[in-house]
């Protein structure tokens, strides 16, 4: 496996956490990102 895959996974995880921490972030914007995070973990 390439290191790129790990970098992308950690990026999505950090980005997902960042969106979750933003107050007032709409679910409709956050959910697609969280789904993407779940997809990368699977």
Image: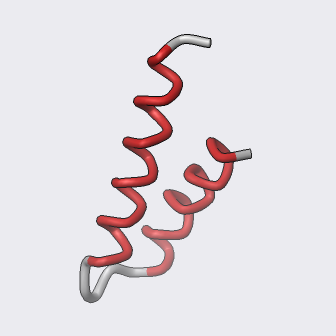
Count numbered badges in the picture. Answer: 0
Who's the residue at 45% across and 69% down the image? 30
Residue that extends furthest to the right in the rendered view of this protein: 42
Q: Who's the residue at 39% across and 81% down the image?
A: 26
Q: Is residue 23 above or below residue 42?
A: below
Q: Position of residue 34 (x, y in %)?
A: 54, 62
Q: Residue at x 47, y 17 (%)?
A: 3
- Where residue 22 appears, as percent x and y from the top left, is 25, 78
Residue 40 falls left or right of residue 20: right
Image quadrant assignment for residue 8: top left
Q: Residue at x 49, y 57 (%)?
A: 33
Give the residue at the far top of this rendering: 2
The C terminus sits in image quarter: top right
**Figure quadrant of the N terminus:** top right
Percent x, y for residue 4?
A: 45, 18
Colour theme:
secondary structure
Q: Position of residue 29 (x, y in %)?
A: 43, 68
In this orientation, which residue lies closer to the viewer: 38 or 24? 38
Pick out the residue farthest to the left: 23
- Find residue 35 and report its image quarter: bottom right
């Amino acid at each position: 496996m390439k290191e790129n895959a790990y970098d992308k996974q950690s990026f999505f995880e950090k980005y997902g956490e960042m969106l979750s921490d933003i107050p007032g972030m709409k679910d409709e914007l956050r959910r697609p990102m969280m789904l993407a995070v779940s997809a990368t973990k699977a």
